[in-house]
Amino acid sequence: MPKKLPLLVLCLAACSKPAAPKLQVYQSVPVERRDIVVSARANGTIQPDTLVEVKSQASGEVLQVRVETGQVVRAGDLMVRIDPRIPKNNVDQALSQLEVAKARLVNAQTQKDRSEALLKSQSITQTEYDQSVLDYATAKAGVVTAQVNLQNAQITLDQTDVRAPITGTIVELDVERGQVISSPISTVGGGTVLLKMADLNRVQVSTLVDETDIGKIQPGLRATVTVNAYPNRPFDGQVLKIEPQATIQQNVTMFPVLVRIENREGLLKPGMNSDVEVHVGRRDSVLAIPVGALRTQRDVNSAAGLMGLTEVEVKTQLAASEPKPAGDTAVKARVAATAAKPAGNTMSLPDGRTVALPPGVTEDQVKAIFRKRMSGEDPTPAERAILRQVFQGMGGSGGGGGAGSGGTRRPTTDARFGGRYIVFVKRQGKPYAVNITTGLTDLDYSEVTTGLTLQDSVLILPSASLIQQQKDFNDRMARVTGGGGIPGMTAGSGSKSSTPSARP
C-alpha cells in the first residue's frame, strides 16, 4: 500500500497544476484605406442589336439577287427581284373586278331610285322596296371589296422589287436565282425568308448572371466586353435590361442580362464569344475592414463568449456606441451638427450632434432611460415611446427594443450594398462591441461608412480557431490522464484540425 502512494501523489499533482493560459482565438486587424471595386463577370455571345428577316409578299421565281453576305446596304436599296408577271396579272384582274363592281353600284342606285318612286305611288310593296335597298348596299360593299383587292394586288406587285427596310449589313442569304418562293400572306408556313440583315453599328451581348449577383445589377450600369479576336482591346458597353424570366442551368438559377455596345468600327461580329464584366460599384481610398469581422445580432453573443464578454456587457457596449462619420469627416460632421443646432428643448450627443427632444421631456429623463437600458433592465412602455421619439429625431429607425437597435443614423447609400453590423474592436486592450454601417463590399473587404476610424482595429474570429481551441483542450487533458481519455468524451474528437489561424 505505501508503494502506491507516490503514484497517487503524482496524479494529484498533475491534476492540481495551474491551467494553461487561455488561447486568444481572435486576431486584431487595423482599419485601413482601400480601393473597393465590385463587378459581376459572365460569358456571352455577340448578337445584332437589330435583326430583320426580309420576306416578300409576292410569290414567284427569283430573277435577281443583287446583294451578298457582308454587304452594307442602305434603306430603300434594291436587293432581290421576283418575277412580276403573276402579281401584274392579279392587278389587272382586280382592276377589271373594280369596274364591274362600280357598274353594279350604278345599276343598284337606279333600281333603288325607281323603287322609291313606285313605293310612293303604291305600285310596289314595302318588301320589294326593301329588297332594292339591300341590293344597293350589296353593290356598294362590292365596290369597296374590289378596291381593297386592287390595292393588295398592287402592293404585291410592288413587293416583286424587294428593297432594304433598314440600313444594315447582310448577315444571311437564304435564296438564290431561279428559286421559287412563297408569300407569307398566302401560305400557312409563313412564307420564304429571302435574307437576314442587321444593323451592326450597335450590337449586344446576351449573358447569364447568377442570381446571387443579379440584385447588384441594374439597367444603365457600365460594362466592359472583351472578345478573343481582340484580347487587348476592351469594348465599353451598358446594361440594357434584365430579363424577368430566370434560366436554370445545372441546378443554378441565372437571369439573362443584355449589354449594348457601340460598334461603329464594325469589329464585333455576331456569334463572337465574349467575356462581360459589369461594373457594379467602385470606392477609392475608403475605410475598409475584412468581412470576417462583421457580426449580426444572431451571432454576436456566441462571438462575444469566445472573447470573454458576457451578454450584458455586449448590450451595454452596443447601447453606448453611437456610429460616427467614418474617417476624416468626423470633425466636419460635428461642426455641421453644431451649426445646425435646433432651437428649443435639445440634447447633446457624445459625437457632437444635437437632437431635439419631445415636448415635456428633459435631458435627464432621457439619460436615465439610457442608463436603465445599459444596466440590462427593460424600459416601460412610456419610456419606450420617449426613446422612439428621440431616435426619430436622430434619424434612426426607432423602436427602442434591443440593445443598439435605435439611435443610429443610417447613411444614404444604395440599398443593394452594405447594411448595419456589429464588430468587436480593441479598446484599452480589451474587446469592445461597436455598431457600424457598411457600404460597398467585394466579399473580402467592406467599406465602413460610420462607426470606425483609422485608429481602430477590428477583431476577427477565424473559423479554424474553434477547432484549434478544442484540440488544445483535448491535448491538455490527454497529458493529464496519460492518454486514457475521460469518461463521457469521445477519443480523438479533436484529431481533425486545420492549421491554426489564431494569433495569441
Image (cartoon, rainbow, N blue to C red):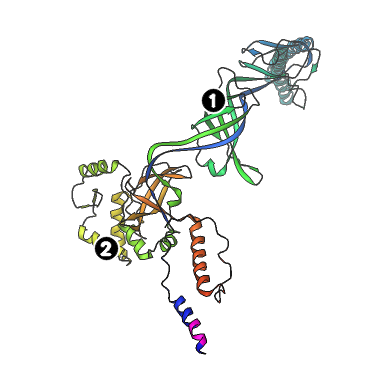
Q: Nearer the viewer, mark 2 or mark 1?
A: 1
Q: Residue at x 43, y 47 (%)?
A: 290
N-terminal of the pair, mark 2 or mark 1, is 1
| Residue 328 location, quadrant | top left
| Residue 73 location, quadrant | top right
Q: Is residue 91 magenta?
A: no
Number of numbered discs: 2
Q: Which residue is mark 2?
A: 371
Per the image, label 1 sits on a secondary structure element best described as: strand
Q: Picture coordinates of residue 221 (x, y %)?
A: 49, 32
Q: Which residue is mark 1?
A: 235
Q: Nearer the viewer, residue 197 or 280?
A: 280
Q: Nearer the viewer, residue 43 or 12?
A: 12
Q: Residue 87: tell me if it is visible.
A: yes
Per the image, label 2 sits on a secondary structure element best described as: helix
Q: Picture coordinates of residue 106 (x, y %)?
A: 71, 12
Q: Nearer the viewer, residue 35 or 393?
A: 35
Rendered image: mark on residue 1: none
State the predominant SS element of the stretch in magenta: helix
Q: Amino acid at mark 1?
A: Phe
